[in-house]
Amino acid sequence: MRRQGKTRIAFRFYLFLFAAVCMLGYGVYTALDSMIQRSAVIESGDMGNQYMVDAVIARNEKLTDAEGVTSVKFYVDEGGHVAQGNKIVEVYSTGYSQTDMNKLLSVRSQIKDQHKILKASTHGDIQLENLEKKVMDYTREFELMVRGTGHGNLLNLERQIQAAMNARQSYLRNKHAADQSLTSLYENETTLVKKIANWTNNKVATSDCIVSFYTDGYENYLDVNDLDNITPAQVLGVLAGQRPPTSLAQRGRVPIYREVNPSGWYLLLISHDANWKPVEGQAYKVELAGFDDHIVEGVVTTATRTGSDLLIRMKVKGDVRPVLNVRTTKAQVGEEYVSGLKVPNNALRQQGGQMGVVLMDSGGIFVPVNVVMQNNDYAVIQSLAVGALWEGQKIRVF
């Protein structure tokens, strides 16, 4: 029993001795650390971060669709620029009959032949000659515009041609009202025109735009006028190829074309980088996959983080044509590189609410700085006082 008691006393003693040695060692380390301060050297260097992201492209575009479409006649090429008011397509809806169209062409041919017969009997009609000259002048002007050598608005000119033809036709009707054959032909023409008008619809440009006939169903879903309310989940759904929900108003309607604003488009970027903290107004260089050597500048409008998903919304200035028919892609986003004086992050210290560094060569003087750019290890700084810092100076590391 006595031997066991001695053993317990010796064990406690060694524990106490070990604790005392640890405390003494820590005190010595603290004293030495305060006497021998750690330091770093100001360097000259560059800095800039690169991020790989998934990108969804949103354009300022308007989708035109129609119900009961049977066929479409196109007046514009894919990717063509159209002025406001110019015709883009002629839509033929349910009820379309090529037989009726053929009948109308036949009746108008007969009317033309009858006009020639009557004209021969009324040679020297100055008023009729003036009306016909106006139609011919407008027609020649129209041909020049179609060939690209004329100027003006095609839709306005088309209306002028139609008005001149109607005036000539009205004159001939009144002049030859007694001609039963011509009257009968006019009545047939009127009946067919009214019937055809029920299933034809001319679509014109609502603004100066680029026209595309390729649609993917996301035109209304990715509304640039409501960009800030688009969520990371929505963007991830587009990247995954999920079809957007269809409203009751859209069911049964067929998409025909898009009117796309030629300048300015948007990027919706998904990143999983926990350290990326983009701010409004910050500019980045963006290179889209498949567009080598074509780099655009995107300016952050807003950013939203949901869990590990960071959604960055960017506005891009420039021609939309390269991405006219692109919806999703990969992208590399980079901050503009900056050059300057580079220091370790642990050399930065706040004093009185101002960030700065402490010079060791000058007795511990605190030098206020502006942090130009920073990553996980280093920061590029600029002294607030001109010439206060330079490469090679020793600074305190905390």
Image (cartoon, rainbow, N blue to C red):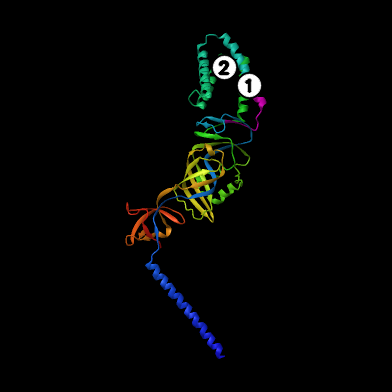
Q: Residue at x 47, y 77 (%)?
A: 19
Query: Three-letter amino acid code at disc 2?
Result: Arg
**Residue 247 image point, x, y percent:** 60, 44
Does 382 appear above or below 298? below
Q: Secondary structure at mark 2?
A: helix
Q: Secondary structure at mark 1?
A: helix
Q: Is residue 113 visible in this depiction of the protein? A: yes
Of callouts 1 and 2, which one flags the residue occurring earlier in the amino acid sequence? Answer: 1
Task: Classify residue 162 by image quadrant.
Answer: top right
Q: Nearer the viewer, residue 369 or 143?
A: 369
**Residue 173 image point, x, y percent:** 57, 17
Give the distance between the C-alpha atoms of the residues marked 1 and 2, in whole angstroms: 19 Å
Residue at the spot of label 1 = 105
Q: Is residue 10 magenta?
A: no
Q: Residue at x 54, y 29 (%)?
A: 87
**Residue 208 image point, x, y percent:** 49, 33
Q: Which residues are magenta?
A: 89-104
Residue at the spot of label 2 = 173
Q: Does the residue at mark 1 contact the one at mark 2 (Cβ under 8 Å)?
A: no
